[in-house]
Image (cartoon, rainbow, N blue to C red):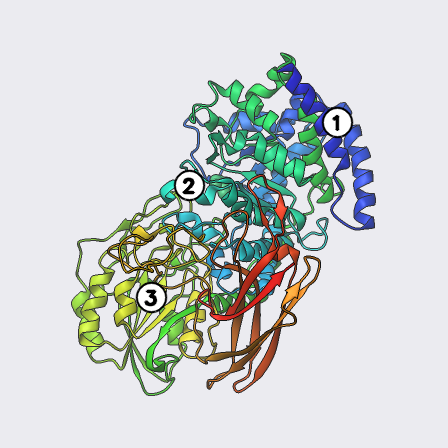
Amino acid sequence: MKKMQHYFTVCLTILFFSCSSFGQNTKEQNSITYEKKIEELLAKMTVEEKVGQMNLYNGFWDATGPVPKKGNAKTKYEHLKKGWVGAMLNVKGSDKTRELQKFAVEETRLGIPLLFGFDVIHGYKTLSPIPLAESASWDLEAIEKSARVAATEASAAGINWTFAPMVDISRDARWGRVMEGGGEDPYLGSKIAVARVKGFQGENLSAKNTIIATAKHFAAYGFIEAGKEYNTVSIGNSTLYNTVLPPFKAAKDAGVRSFMNAFNDLNGIPASTNTFLQRDILKGKWNFNGFVVSDWASINEAIFWGQAKDKKEAAYLAATAGSDMDMEGYVYIKELANLVKDGKVDETILDHAVRRILKVKFELGLFDDPYKYCNEDREKKIIGQQSHHNAVLDMAKKSIVLLKNQNQLLPLQKEGKKIALIGHLADDDNSPLGSWRLASDDHSAVTILDGMKAYKGNTLSYEKGVELYNGNPTFVTEVNINTTNRKGIQEAVETAKNADVVVMVLGEHGFQSGEGRTRTNLDLPGLQQELLEAVYKVNPNIVLVLQAGRPLAINWAKEHIPAIVMGWQLGTQTGNAIAQVLYGDYNPSGKLPMTFPRNVGQIPIYYNYKSTGRGSNTQNNVFWSHYSDVENTPLYPFGYGLSYTSFQYDNLQINKLKFSKEETIKISVDLTNMGNYDGKEVVQLYIRDKFASTVRPVKELKGFELVALKRGETKNINFELSKAELGFYNNQGTFLVEEGEFEIFVGTDSNADLKAIFELK
Ligand code: NOJ
């Protein structure tokens, strides 16, 4: 152990001082000033006070994880007063944060201010769509703005640290947390990660309305086996380096100030005690100079993983592996000081962790004004202001994906029609808020029924059909899905019979996705499929609006229902957004950030799968990579989404046929709006590296542009590719750019087939 400590002491010292500060001159100067102050402070701290900075306690009101059985509020207050707490989570409101900050600043020996962390995942009080939905916009500016609105509200309520963005790539729609991420693709996921970090952190961290962001969950949580929550992970290096890590690296490069580790293991080492991930990659290779927080009690869980025999060993393993802060795990606070005193953990390990944490506190300006986020007038004025509602409405409309629109059933006519609106979710003001909305008011979403009522030229009748769920699901309870009570189906059928168009709102409750919510079945839950088919029998003129936090397997609907709209959970302004899209006041342009499977058995299903030895059926026999009972293709591919207008791609050109590795490849394509509406299209560019030293995906997204076109208009769209897009990581994590032939594909989704070829020499 001694040898190891020495290694850490030397490496960490070199690392900390060689870490480049994250900005231009002023930032560098500030950082030099901070470093002096940090050293002065550190010199005064006892071991217990150092451990205190590494201790993150949950507050006394809400909890986002399992809470210890015995009430421990008293101990927490005592620890606060002793300076044994560096940060709190789940404390919100300028009054409560001020009260606790006062303890830290006025009653502790050194008066070091607290960080206040919170899961500001898709808004604070005014909610944006769930992150997966936002990702469907492919609109990076809008996504950044949405995070900005969230940070503005959260910072007005005393919060200075969000546990977002979740940048876990996932190919498994069973996993409930796909709702929280950017989807299945590392390129899109990286761009979105950067947009969100920029939105939360802004230009200047010391401003009153910016908060620090967290790239989570480091790493590979999106690859838990069978999508089962908190499970083990088994992936190879190629997936780790090329798929899992890129969005984290992008977030780091964008200056994210904290990383959160994860509940999973990687190669048998839990993420919280994983030296390879935290020390070698994150703090070593990437020179990350912020701090790493554990996930909720995840350090403690090294015991249940069977890696540590007790809390002492868990604390030792996590601290030496580079976890700087223990979230609600009581492990550091209980064991770390003794480990130092017993000579088991070198104090410099604590010093390095504390330096990182203090640095962020300095960057936020907490030492200048610890109460800067605790202003009640500001809180009242800012939270829920109209401009925030406008922004989340805009984001919600941009997130909607039109999946099918046979015979232009949509947009709906605004006058003289009889519309039947059916579905429990259509009149639900809680579910559309989605999961992860701890600071919002329950039942505060605009319902689709209310959104539709604003269009007064038609006659609107509403029927629930069947109850989707019983009771009032919460963040910590399972949703009790109705599978027996069919009361209401007949009324819905009668109403549908007399309608010109039926709008059915079906899908999942907002709390069927999110943490702790894995499903093994991706059909419409409960009796909704039965309701859909019953209504279809009497009136097939149906617009199906789907609400869900993940892709659903809606085969029957795709085959029979003429119009389908993916409406996710769109947050506070859900009803207005859906109504404006259905009535054509907004032309949808969203594209799927995750593949929709035909059935659960196809999962993991994703567009950028690797080439295999038997990828196609050349001899018309069974000896190729396929299923016997369902085709290989998905229900809807990654990148898919329609518009009320139509687009045509022509004239794909590359400026040359052969390039050196140092050259930039210029690609252009003409895009024409052929339909009757102005609209937006996400032009997508994919590459295929035809031969390489390790197997490459059949297609990889390497560029996209959101283009607005008036009807009849043509635009010339340009892309550039260079080394960064053409290379890949080998199994040792080295980035390689190899010579050879590449294909490029440009088009409207991942099935893009307008193709060109070039060679890298
Ligand atoms: C556990 C979740 O995994 C994490 O994402 C979240 O930030 C923490 N709980 C805190 O609520």
Q: Amino acid at mark 2?
A: Ile
Query: Given the image, on which type of amino acid does mark 3 rest?
Result: Ala
- The spot of residue 750 in percent (x, y) is 46, 64
Q: Secondary structure at mark 1?
A: helix
Q: Earlier in the sequence, mark 3 or mark 2?
A: 2
Q: Is residue 291 above or below residue 500?
A: above
Is residue 62 shown to the viewer in this render? no
Q: CA distance from mark 3 to mark 2?
A: 33 Å
Give the label, 1 or 3, closer to the camera.
Answer: 1
For the point 38% across and 54% down, which residue is it? 605
Q: Position of residue 143 (x, y in %)?
A: 57, 61
* Between marks 2 and 1 in the image, the one whose residue lies nearer the viewer: 2
State the image coordinates of residue 238 (x, y, percent, origin top left). 51, 44
Q: Mark number for residue 42?
A: 1
The residues bearing labels 2 and 1 have C-alpha atoms spaced at a distance of: 39 Å
Instruction: Residue 270 in the image: state x and y as whole percent.
Output: 49, 31
| Label ID, residue 193 | none
Residue wearing tag 2: 224
Q: Nearer the viewer, residue 361 or 312?
A: 312
Disc 3 packing (10 Å; few <14; some 14–19; many ≥20): many
Q: Secondary structure at mark 2?
A: loop
In the image, residue 184 above or below residue 411: above
**In the drawing, does residue 172 fall left or right of residue 553?**
right
Q: Which label sits in the foreground, 3 or 2?
A: 2
Type of amino acid under label 1: Leu
Residue beneath disc 3: 426
Going from the N terminus, do you reach mark 1 or mark 3 first?
1
Vertical arrangement, residue 12 with respect to residue 121, above or below: above
Could you tell me which secondary element the residue under label 3 belongs to? helix
| Residue 556: quadrant of the picture | bottom left
- CB of mark 1 within 8 Å of CB of mark 3? no
